[in-house]
Image (cartoon, rainbow, N blue to C red):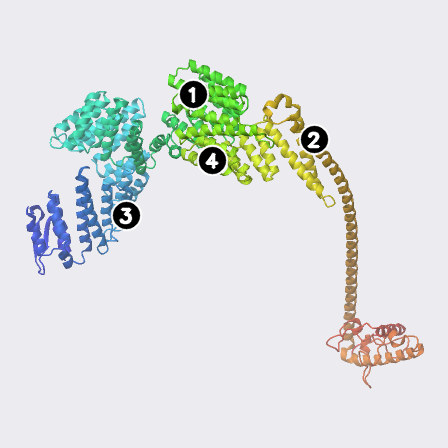
C-alpha cells in the first residue's frame, strides 16, 4: 500500500511520491531537495500527494533551516484539492494546520515587546489555524489542537487557560493512541506557576504511562522534588537519568547543586567531601558538554563556578565565552552577566555596574542583568529607589510570570511614594501566585493610611500563609512590624480581642519563645498581663506593650491597662503617651485630681524629651485639649473659657481654630440652664441666648470646614435641646453617614448615642433602647456608663423596669462611685416595687400573689436603703450629685410608706394562705381516706371472686372423678346398653316412691316434688315410655339393701345433674337450677341413703 511504501522510504531518507492514477512512484531524496521549492510543490500538486507526504517534505526543508519553504509547503498542503482526493486523511490535515499554528506561535515569540501589533497578528493567525484543526472530523476528540492551543496560551502569558487546555488534552488521544504530551505540558505550566506538587504528579503520571519517555521527564521529577524538599527522591530521579544517559548535563548539574547546598549546612571534613563531590560532577558535566571551544559550554561552566563561589574562574570562563561568541549577542550578554556577578560578589561595584549595563545593551530581553543593575541602584541609597524599580520593571518583562519580582517592584514603588503603581505590581504578584505572603503584607502596608479594612484583610492573609513558618522567620523585623500593624488595624475596627492577640504574638516573637497565648478572658487574666510587663525591654517591646495597653483600655479593663502603662513608664520613664492615657482613664473614672497630675507630668516631659519644636507644639495642644475636657466635666466654665482664649491666641491660623471654636460651642451648650415648668421670661431668654450662641459657633466651623462632623453633631444637639426632634434626627443621620464614610468609629459611637437620645425624647423608646444596645455591643463592650444610663432610661420609659434595673446594676458594677447611677437604680426599684404592690392591692378579694408582694416589699426596702444612704452623704457630695435633698426626702418617705403597707399586706396574705392551705390539706386527707376505702373494697371483691373460682374448679374436679368411677362400673356391667334397661326400671321405681312421699307430705306445705329433688313427666326430661324398663346402670348397677322390694333409686336426673356425660347421649344437658329440681335431688338423696347397695355382678 501507499503508507507501507511511505514508511519504508522515510527509513531510507527517501520519499516516493505515488503518480496519480498510475502504479508508479517518483523517488525524491530528502538530502538532495532542490533549493527551488516550487519544483517540489509542482510535483506534489501534480500528483496530488497525500497530506503525510507534504508534511515530510516540509520537515525536510525545516531541518535544513529553510523555514520559509516549510511554511509554503504546509500552506499548499492544506489546499481543498488535496482534501478532495484524500478525504480520509483527517489526522494529517489536522497535523498540517497545527504545524502552521506552532510556526506562528514561535514567530510571535521572536518579536520584541515593542512590536505588539506584529505579535498579536501572529497569535491571531495561530488561533485561526487551531480553530480550523478543531473543526475537522474527529478533531474534537484529538488532543493535538488542544496542545497547540495550550502552547499559544503559554506564549501569551495566559497560564490558567493553558493549564486547562493541557489538562483536557491529557484526557484525549492522539490518532487513537495514548500520548503523554498533554501531561507534560500541564507539568511545565505548573512549574511556571510554582505549583510543584501538581507538576510532580503530572510528571509521575506521564512516566507511568510511558516508561520509555525521554530523560527530561525524570529531570522534571527531580526538579519538582528539589523544590518540595524531597531531596532523596530528587537524587534518585537524577541518578536514574544518569543511568539512562550517562552524560546528561542537566542531571549532573542538578546533583552538583544539591551537593553544594548540602555543604552549606556542614562543617569541617564533611563539608569538604561534599564540595569535592560537587566539583567532580561539574567537571563531568563540562567534559560531557563538548569541549572548551564551545561558548555554550564555557558559559554554562562559568555559571557553575559562580554558583560555587569561585568568582575568579567564573569571570575567566565568562571572558573566554564572550570572546568566542562575537557573533552571538545573547550569549555575550550572559557572559557579561556572569562577569558582573563575580565583580559584585567581590565588592567591585563600579565594574559590576558597568558589566550589568553592557549586558543589558547586548540583549535587552535578558532579564538577569536588569536585576543586577537594580541591586546596584539600591546600594547607592534611597535616592535611587525609583531607578531600581525601573530596572526591575524591565527585568519583569523578560520574566512576566515571576510573582517575587513583581512584589519587589511594588515594594520599591511603595517606598518611593507611588502607592498606585505599587498596588498595580503587588496585585499582579498575587494574581500570579496567591500564596505570595510578602505581596499581601506589602499591599496591607499600602492600605494602612487609606483603607484599614483592606489592609486588615491582606494582613490576615499574610498571617494565614505564614502560620507554619520557621521560628527564625517569625523573629524577623518585618514579621514583628506586620503583627503590630495588624493589631492596629484590628484596633481601628474596634476588634480589641483580635488586636490584643496580634500584639501578644509580636511580643512572643520578640521575647523568643515566651508563651503569651491568652484565653477568651484575656482582658481579665492578670497573670498574663504581669508576665508581659515583667519581660519588657526598651525599644520595640515598649511600643507593642503600649499598644496592648490601649486595646485593653478600650475594652474597659482599666486596672490591667493602668498596670501596663505603669510598666512601660518604669521601663521608659519619658514615654509621654502613657501619662496622657492615664489622665484619660482617670477622667473617665471621675478622678479629676489624678488626671490633672498626669497632665502635669506629661507637660514636664515635653521640656526634657528630645523632640522637635513642631512636635512639641502639637503635644501641647493635645494637653490643652485634655484640660478643656476636664474643666468642662468639672463645670469650671471660667477656666475653660480662659484656656480656649489662650489656644486661639497661640494658633492664629484659621485651620487651627476648629477645636477651640467647637469647644466654645460645647461650652455654651453645657452652660445652658435646664428647662423647668415654672421658668420666668428672663430664664427662657437666657436659654435661647446660649443655644443660639452655641449654634453660631458650630455654623462658623461648618462654613469654613464643611466636612467637620463634630460641628454638625453639635448643631444636632442644639436642635435636640430645642425639641426639634425631626431636624435633630436628620442632622444626626447626616453625621452618621459621614462617620461611616470616614471610618471614624469614635464619632460614629457618639452620633449613635445622640440619635438614641433623640428617639428617646421623641417617644420612640424601643428604637432608643435598640440603639443603646448596639452601641454597647459594638463600641463599648457594655462598659460605657453614659450609654448604659441611656439604655436604662429607654427601657424605663418603655415600661421594662426589670431590664432597666439590670442595666443600671451593670453600670454600677463598673462605676460604683457614680452616685447618679445609684439614685436612678433606687428610683427604678421604687417604681417597680410600687407598681407590683398597687397591682396586687387592686386584686384584693381575689387571689393576690404572695411572691409578687414579697418582691415588691424587697424592692421598696432596697430603694429605701439606697435613698437613706444618699441622704446621709448628701452634704459631702451634693456638688457632684445633681439632685436636691428635698427630692431624696420625698422618695425616701414614699418608699417607707409603701414598704409598711406592703409588709402588712404580706402578713395578712400569709395568714390567708395558711388558712387556705389547712383547708386544702384537710380535703387532701379526705380524698386519701376515700381512696384507701375504695382500694380495700376492690381487693375484697377480687378475693371473693378468686375463692368462688377455686370452689367451682374443685366441684368440677370432683365431678370428673365420679365420672371416671362410673365409666369403670359400666365396663364391668357389659356396657351402657345392658345398663340402659335397668336404669329406666330404677327410674320408674324411684318416681313411684317419690309420688308416695309427696302424697304423705301433702300438697299444701309447699314442698312436693320440688323439695324431693324429683322431676315430673311434664318437665325438662320426659319419663320412659310404657313398658320400658328402668336401667340399673344409672345407679351403677347397685340395688338397695334396706328395702329390697322397692324399686332401685336412679341418680338425680341421671348423669346430667352432675354435669357428666351420659353414655347414651352424645352431649350432656345442663340442668336448670330451679326450686323444683332442688327438691327432687334432696328426696332422691334420702332414698339412696335408705337403700342398700347390691353386690357387683360380672357382665354376661
Q: Is residue 1090 visible?
A: yes
Q: Residue at x 45, y 29 (%)?
A: 698
To which residue does mark 4 refer? 732
- N-terminal-most mark, 3 or 2: 3
Residue found farthest to the bottom: 1027
Alpha-carbon distance for marks 2 and 4?
42 Å
Callout 2–callout 4 Cβ contact below 8 Å:
no
Between label 1 and label 2, give the one nearer the viewer.
1
Tell me if mark 1 has few (under 14), some (14-19) or many (20+) residues whose alpha carbon lies within 10 angstroms of its own.
Answer: some
To which residue does mark 3 refer? 170
- N-terminal-most mark, 4 or 1: 1
**In this picture, residue 825 sits left or right of residue 136:** right
- N-terminal-most mark, 1 or 2: 1
> In the figure, residue 66 lies in which quadrant?
top left
> Does residue 851 sit above or below 1075 in this rendering?
above
Q: Residue at x 55, y 39 (%)?
A: 765
Foreground: 177 or 331?
331
Identify the element where label 2 is drawn: helix
Amino acid at each position: 500500500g501507499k503508507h507501507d511504501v511511505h514508511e519504508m522510504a522515510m527509513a531510507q531518507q527517501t520519499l516516493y511520491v505515488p503518480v496519480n492514477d498510475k502504479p508508479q512512484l517518483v523517488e525524491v531524496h530528502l538530502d538532495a531537495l532542490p533549493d527551488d521549492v516550487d519544483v517540489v510543490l509542482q510535483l506534489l500538486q501534480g500528483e496530488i500527494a497525500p497530506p503525510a507526504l507534504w508534511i515530510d517534505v516540509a520537515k525536510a526543508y525545516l531541518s535544513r533551516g529553510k523555514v520559509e519553504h516549510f511554511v509554503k509547503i504546509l500552506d499548499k498542503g492544506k489546499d481543498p484539492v488535496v482534501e478532495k482526493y484524500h478525504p480520509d486523511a483527517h489526522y494529517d490535515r489536522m497535523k498540517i494546520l497545527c504545524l502552521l499554528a506552532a510556526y506562528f506561535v514561535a514567530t510571535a515569540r521572536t518579536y520584541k515587546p515593542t512590536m505588539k501589533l506584529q505579535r498579536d497578528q501572529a497569535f491571531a493567525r495561530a488561533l485561526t489555524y487551531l480553530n480550523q484543526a478543531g473543526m475537522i472530523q474527529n478533531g474534537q476528540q484529538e488532543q493535538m489542537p488542544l496542545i497547540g492551543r495550550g502552547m499559544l496560551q503559554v506564549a501569551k502569558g495566559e497560564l490558567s487557560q493553558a493549564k486547562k487546555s493541557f489538562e483536557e488534552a491529557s484526557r484525549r488521544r492522539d490518532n487513537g493512541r495514548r500520548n503523554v504530551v498533554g501531561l507534560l505540558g500541564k507539568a511545565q505550566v505548573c512549574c511556571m506557576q510554582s505549583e510543584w506538587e501538581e507538576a510532580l504528579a503530572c510528571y509521575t503520571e506521564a512516566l507511568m504511562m510511558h516508561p520509555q519517555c525521554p530523560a527530561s521527564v525524570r529531570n522534571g521529577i527531580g526538579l519538582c522534588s528539589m523544590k518540595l524538599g524531597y531531596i532523596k527522591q530528587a537524587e534518585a530521579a537524577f541518578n536514574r537519568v544518569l543511568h539512562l544517559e550517562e552524560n546528561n548535563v542537566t542531571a549532573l548539574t542538578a546533583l552538583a547543586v544539591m551537593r553544594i547546598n548540602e555543604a552549606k549546612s556542614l562543617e569541617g571534613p564533611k563539608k569538604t567531601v561534599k564540595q569535592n563531590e560537587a566539583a567532580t560532577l561539574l567537571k563531568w558535566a563540562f567534559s560531557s558538554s563538548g569541549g572548551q571551544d564551545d561558548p555554550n559550554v564555557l558559559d554554562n561552566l562559568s555559571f557553575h563556578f559562580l554558583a560555587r563561589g569561585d568568582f575568579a574562574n567564573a569571570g575567566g570562563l565568562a571572558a573566554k565565552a564572550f570572546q568566542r561568541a562575537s557573533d552571538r549577542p545573547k550569549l555575550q550578554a550572559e557572559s557579561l552577566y556572569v562577569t558582573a556577578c563575580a565583580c559584585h560578589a567581590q565588592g567591585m561595584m563600579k565594574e559590576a555596574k558597568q558589566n550589568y549595563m553592557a549586558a543589558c545593551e547586548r540583549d535587552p530581553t535578558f532579564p538577569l542583568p536588569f536585576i543586577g543593575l537594580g541591586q546596584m541602584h539600591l546600594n547607592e541609597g534611597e535616592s535611587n529607589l525609583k531607578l531600581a524599580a525601573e530596572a526591575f520593571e524591565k527585568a519583569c518583562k523578560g520574566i512576566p510570570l515571576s510573582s517575587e519580582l513583581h512584589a519587589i517592584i511594588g515594594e520599591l514603588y511603595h517606598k518611593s511614594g507611588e502607592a498606585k503603581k505599587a498596588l498595580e505590581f503587588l496585585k499582579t504578584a498575587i494574581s500570579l501566585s496567591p500564596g505570595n505572603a510578602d505581596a499581601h503584607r506589602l499591599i496591607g502596608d499600602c492600605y494602612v493610611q487609606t483603607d484599614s479594612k483592606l489592609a486588615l484583610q491582606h494582613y490576615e492573609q499574610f498571617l494565614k500563609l505564614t502560620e507554619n513558618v520557621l521560628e527564625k522567620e517569625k523573629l524577623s523585623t518585618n514579621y514583628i512590624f506586620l503583627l503590630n500593624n495588624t493589631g492596629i488595624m484590628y484596633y481601628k475596627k474596634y476588634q480589641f480581642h483580635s488586636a490584643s492577640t496580634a500584639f501578644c504574638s509580636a511580643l512572643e516573637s520578640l521575647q523568643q519563645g515566651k508563651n503569651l497565648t491568652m484565653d477568651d478572658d484575656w482582658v481579665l487574666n492578670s497573670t498574663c498581663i504581669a508576665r508581659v510587663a515583667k519581660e519588657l525591654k526598651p525599644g520595640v517591646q515598649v511600643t507593642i506593650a503600649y499598644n496592648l495597653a490601649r486595646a485593653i483600655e478600650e475594652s474597659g479593663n482599666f486596672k490591667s491597662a493602668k498596670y501596663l502603662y505603669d510598666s512601660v513608664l518604669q521601663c521608659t520613664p519619658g514615654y509621654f503617651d502613657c501619662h496622657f492615657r492615664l489622665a484619660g482613664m482617670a477622667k473617665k473614672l471621675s478622678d479629676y485630681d489624678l488626671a490633672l497630675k498626669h497632665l502635669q507630668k506629661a507637660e514636664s516631659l515635653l521640656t526634657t524629651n528630645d523632640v522637635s519644636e513642631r512636635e512639641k507644639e502639637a503635644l501641647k495642644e493635645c494637653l490643652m485639649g485634655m484640660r478643656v475636657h476636664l474643666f468642662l466635666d468639672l463645670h469650671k466654665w471660667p477656666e475653660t473659657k480662659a484656656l480656649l482664649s489662650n489656644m486661639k491666641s497661640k494658633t492664629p491660623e484659621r485651620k487651627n481654630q476648629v477645636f477651640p471654636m467647637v469647644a466654645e460651642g460645647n461650652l455654651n451648650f453645657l452652660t445652658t440652664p435646664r428647662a423647668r415648668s415654672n421658668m420666668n421670661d428672663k430664664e427662657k431668654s437666657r436659654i435661647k441666648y446660649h443655644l443660639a450662641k452655641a449654634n453660631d459657633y458650630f455654623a462658623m466651623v461648618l462654613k469654613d470646614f464643611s466636612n467637620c462632623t463634630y460641628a454638625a453633631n453639635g448643631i444636632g444637639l442644639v436642635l435636640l435641646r430645642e425639641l426639634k426632634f425631626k431636624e435633630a434626627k436628620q442632622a444626626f443621620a447626616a453625621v452618621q453617614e459621614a462617620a461611616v464614610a470616614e471610618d471614624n468609629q469614635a464619632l460614629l459611637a457618639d452620633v449613635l448615642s445622640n440619635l438614641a437620645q433623640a428617639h428617646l425624647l421623641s417617644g420612640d423608646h424601643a428604637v432608643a433602647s435598640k440603639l443603646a444596645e448596639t452601641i454597647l455591643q459594638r463600641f463599648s463592650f457594655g462598659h460605657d456608663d453614659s450609654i448604659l444610663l441611656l439604655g436604662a432610661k429607654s427601657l424605663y420609659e418603655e415600661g421594662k423596669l426589670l431590664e432597666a434595673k439590670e442595666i443600671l446594676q451593670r453600670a454600677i458594677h463598673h462605676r460604683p462611685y457614680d452616685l447618679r447611677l445609684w439614685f436612678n437604680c433606687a428610683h427604678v426599684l421604687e417604681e417597680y416595687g410600687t407598681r407590683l404592690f398597687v397591682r396586687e392591692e387592686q386584686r384584693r378579694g381575689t387571689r393576690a400573689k404572695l411572691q409578687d408582694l414579697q418582691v415588691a416589699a424587697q424592692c421598696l426596702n432596697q430603694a429605701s436603703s439606697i435613698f437613706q444612704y444618699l441622704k446621709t452623704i448628701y452634704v459631702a457630695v451634693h456638688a457632684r450629685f445633681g439632685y436636691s435633698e428635698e427630692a431624696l426626702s420625698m422618695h425616701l418617705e414614699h418608699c417607707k410608706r409603701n414598704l409598711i403597707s406592703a409588709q402588712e399586706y404580706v402578713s395578712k396574705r400569709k395568714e390567708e394562705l395558711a388558712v387556705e392551705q389547712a383547708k386544702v390539706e384537710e380535703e387532701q386527707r379526705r380524698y386519701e381516706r376515700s381512696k384507701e376505702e375504695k382500694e380495700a373494697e376492690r381487693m375484697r371483691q377480687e378475693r371473693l371472686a378468686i375463692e368462688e373460682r377455686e370452689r367451682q374448679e374443685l366441684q368440677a374436679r370432683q365431678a370428673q372423678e365420679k365420672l371416671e368411677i362410673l365409666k369403670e362400673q359400666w365396663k364391668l356391667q357389659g356396657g351402657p346398653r345392658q345398663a340402659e334397661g335397668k336404669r329406666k326400671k330404677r327410674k320408674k321405681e324411684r318416681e313411684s316412691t317419690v309420688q308416695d312421699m309427696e302424697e304423705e307430705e301433702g300438697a299444701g306445705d309447699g314442698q312436693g316434688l320440688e323439695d324431693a329433688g324429683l322431676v315430673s313427666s311434664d318437665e325438662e326430661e320426659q319419663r320412659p315410655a310404657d313398658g320400658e324398663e328402668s336401667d340399673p346402670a344409672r345407679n351403677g348397677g347397685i340395688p338397695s339393701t334396706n328395702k329390697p322390694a322397692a324399686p332401685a333409686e336412679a341418680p338425680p336426673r341421671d348423669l346430667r345433674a352432675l354435669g357428666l356425660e351420659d353414655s347414651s347421649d352424645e352431649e350432656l344437658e345442663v340442668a336448670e337450677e330451679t326450686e323444683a329440681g332442688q327438691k327432687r335431688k334432696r328426696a332422691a338423696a334420702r332414698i339412696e341413703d335408705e337403700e342398700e347397695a347390691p353386690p357387683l355382678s360380672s357382665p354376661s
